[in-house]
Amino acid sequence: DVVDVRSLTGKGLFTYDPGFVSTAATESKITYIDGAAGVLLHRGYPIEQLAEKSDYLETCFLLLHGELPSDEQKAQFVSTIKNHTMVHEQLSHFFNGFRRDAHPMAVMCGVVGALSAFYHDSLDIHDEHHRLVSAHRLIAKMPTLAAMVYKYSIGQPFMYPRNELSYSENFLHMMFNTPCEEKEVSPILAKAMDRIFLLHADHEQNASTSTVRLAGSTGANPFACIASGIAALWGPAHGGANEAVLNMLNEIGDESNIDKFIAKAKDKDDPFRLMGFGHRVYKNFDPRAKVMKQTCDEVLAELGMENDPLLKIAMKLEKIATEDEYFVKRGLYPNVDFYSGIILKAIGIPTELFTVIFATGRTPGWIAHWNEMISEGYRIGRPRQLYTGHTKRDYPA
Ligand code: ACO
């Protein structure tokens, strides 16, 4: 049942809902989730079908425009995105201000926010064309910036995008090639990368998307809004979980330690949680996790990595946790981050960069929600509070 409190707020009704567990902050036509049934639809299309039949850029178009593109529209969209893959040369100087061992998400927050300073020609948020140009710029430049963050951290020169490559091939080229050695990008790895981006593309009003909408509701420019989304995504309870999963698997170290970690996760006096398990909305299997697991199996088989020790720990953990009463009773199944971390490791992406990959994939979702809000009319987001502090008192004489 949905109670629309808009008609009741003037009559003294006040709702208190920490964590927004049962409060809708907006209407939206972009993504539908049924957490109990494990259903995820983008503009009506099931995520499993998109993962099988579509690709990342087509899904970006779908999220932004509401319909799948015709062949002509798709070719035009891909070409437009490729047109925007370069970043302003001046932006590359920003990197020198960061320590090389800075966390990649810290650098991403900075450089994506800094895009606001470069694109004054598209900052009229009430102009539909300006909004679309900003969306294209963000989708196109995120992989370029993500690869630059990595190259800076290891002291290698930045690689320019190669626009004859696909979106994901280009990302892997900018990540792993050097001016001295340019190898062909493996189509298997490029496909896995594309699928990871696609599976992260949108997930309705999660913490980072809600942050983008809240920032956007003040009229802030889109690059600043996306930077706020990146900051919100960073935490281990949200996008940072994929990095935390790998750190946890390393910490477990050996299959013989799994029981100890399961016991820690169940102990209410211990803050430790099994990273990559559980979800606010899915109390059944996350449909993205199913596709991600299948991709994970394909990639590891292709790379001959089925016997990777970390992977063995992950698979054993998955089996135990999905059979253990504690996890089953609470609906704590492996989420999308549990498997994406393993695939990213197999592709050769360093652990600290995992959440940056998530941010890159989530960009079309963030920008589609921002665009929907601005185009359909909005009020500034202004949550209320339940004050529990002192009553009025006088300053000591
Ligand atoms: N390990 C052990 N116990 C857990 C876990 C976990 N990973 N997650 C939840 N629980 C337990 C809680 O202790 C609680 O138990 P109780 O009822 O006995 O007190 C119960 O399950 C419900 O947990 P909540 O924290 O109330 O669930 P909430 O919906 O607020 O949190 C969250 C969801 C943040 C995802 C949580 O499951 C978690 O911390 N998971 C690990 C981090 C993670 O993987 N995050 C990625 C989320 S997916 C994404 O962002 C793409």
Image (cartoon, grey):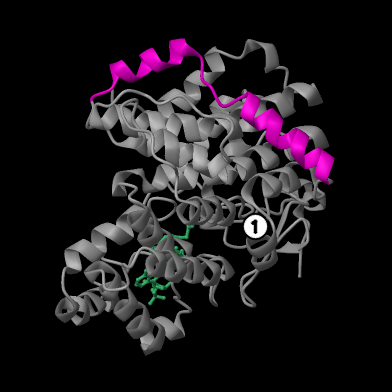
> Which quadrant is the C terminus positioned in?
top left
Name the residue: 33% across, 84% down: 320
Q: Which one is nearer the viewer's eye here, 325 or 93?
A: 93
Question: Can you say whether 204 is above or below 142 in the image?
Answer: below
Residue of label 1: 23
State which quadrant residue 140 falls in: top right
Please indicate whether residue 30 sits to the left or right of residue 141 in the image.
right
Foreground residue, 80 or 372?
80
Quarter of the image holding residue 167?
top right
Badge 1 residue CB within 8 Å of ligand 1: no
* Magenta-tinted stretch: 71-99
* Dot 1 alpha-carbon crowd within 10 angstroms: few under 14, some 14 to 19, many 20 or more: some
Q: Which residue lies at the image location 29% right of the left edge and 59% below the top edge?
A: 246
Query: How far from the left and from the top, in percent, is residue 148?
Result: 39, 28
From the viewer's perspective, tell me whether residue 215 is left or right of residue 131.
left
Within the displayed image, which quadrant is ligand 1 positioned in? bottom left
Please name the residue shown 53% across and 13% down the image: 117
Residue 208 seen from this side: yes
Q: Going 44% across and 66% down the picture, which residue do you hit?
A: 296
Q: Is residue 58 left or right of residue 157?
A: right
Residue 378 seen from this side: no
The residue tagged with tag 1: helix, strand or loop? Answer: loop
